[in-house]
Amino acid sequence: MEETVQHVEEMLDASPVIDVNDTFAQFQQLLADLKAKIDARFATTRDPSTEQLEQYGTYPEGPGGRVAAYSGPEVDWMVHSWLGDPSRSFVNLHLTCWLGPQVKVPHLGIALLCWPGGWFYTDYIPRTDIVVDGDYFDRYYAPPNDAWLEHRADTEFAWFTSRAGFIRASLSPNAYVYSFERTARNIQVVSDRLHAQVDQWLRWVDEAPRCPPASATRCASGTWRPGATSPTATRPTSWACATSARRPPSAWCGRCGAATANCPAHDRPGAQRRGWSS
């Protein structure tokens, strides 16, 4: 089965500079539709710290982007963002939702990318050690396995293996991380998968038992061992969820809403090539 094992800038360097605004518009609409589903379920307010990032850079004449972050009674941190220069082959879009401590439902991570081929990521980010917590695994990671295997067999998609060990360690067993040709068929497959991912996640939220007050701190912390008396020290662990712990500005990318150490656009110095380094 085909696999991609390259840095983002290596793929950019090997490609012609082309206009990907058509796919950018499709990806923007897709994330807007997904966010509308989330907005219909959760009450959130935009964080004032991101208002100055409503538009930055020189887009459409050159590189630019947008970052909007939100929080609410049931949402600790949600980021809807993009960065890039779609007239010159590259654009990176994110939608992530980090839940509050009232439930143990996994967090939601989504990212889309053109470089100039297509790429997508989505994962249910666990809030416990799923190797130890069998009940949690059975509830949230066993049911999606068949759909994951079905997509894994789609020869139009190449599994993307990050060269960074930390990124590989951050993925759940059901993470989708794929490169693909930007055909109408493949973009529709991605759209269908992301809608199904969000729909399932929202059902889990509605069906989830509330965390009792004694364990709310552990629910909020992210990863914890069943029976532990205090939460395990954690940090957000994916491209899409990295800003969720409200890191200091120096630790995360103000352009795409991901940690600068983890964001695909910033993971190597070559990302500076087309003018969007942090």
Image: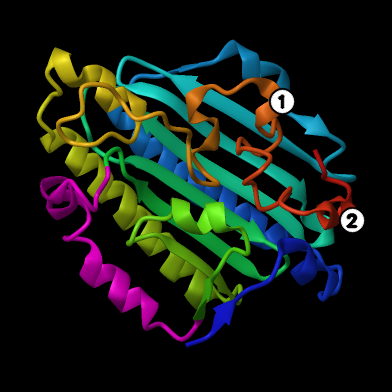
Q: Looking at the picture, how far across and down is residue 164, in whole percent?
A: 61, 58
Is 245 magenta? The answer is no
Q: Nearer the viewer, mark 1 or mark 2?
A: 1
Circle 2 crowding by C-alpha within 10 Å: few under 14, some 14–19, many from 20: few
Q: Looking at the picture, how far across and down is residue 12, in whole percent?
A: 79, 67
Quarter location, residue 217: top left
| Amino acid found under the numbered disc labelled 1 | Ser
Res. 272 visible in picture = yes
Question: In this rendering, is residue 253 above or below 265?
Answer: above
Circle 1 crowding by C-alpha within 10 Å: few under 14, some 14–19, many from 20: few
> Would you name the residue on which mark 1 appears?
250
> Would you name the residue on which mark 2 appears?
273
User: Distance of mark 1 from mark 2, alpha carbons?
Assistant: 21 Å
Q: Could you say which is closer to the camera, residue 121 or residue 263?
A: 263
Question: In this rendering, is residue 22 above or below 136?
Answer: below
| Amino acid found under the numbered disc labelled 2 | Arg
Is 133 magenta? The answer is yes
Q: Residue at x 60, y 11 (%)?
A: 48
Q: Could you say which is closer to the camera, residue 192 or residue 255?
A: 255
Is residue 51 rendered to the left or right of residue 152?
A: right
Q: Residue at x 16, y 60 (%)?
A: 143
* Secondary structure category for the residue under label 1: helix
Q: Could you say which is closer to the camera, residue 42 or residue 12?
A: 12
Which contiguous range is marked in magenta? 129-156
Res. 39 visible in picture = no
Q: Are marks 1 and 2 in contact (CB under 8 Å)?
A: no
Is residue 139 rendered to the left or right of residue 60?
A: left
Is residue 228 rendered to the left or right of residue 72?
A: left
Residue 2, numbered circle: none
Is residue 201 rendered to the left or right of residue 69?
A: left
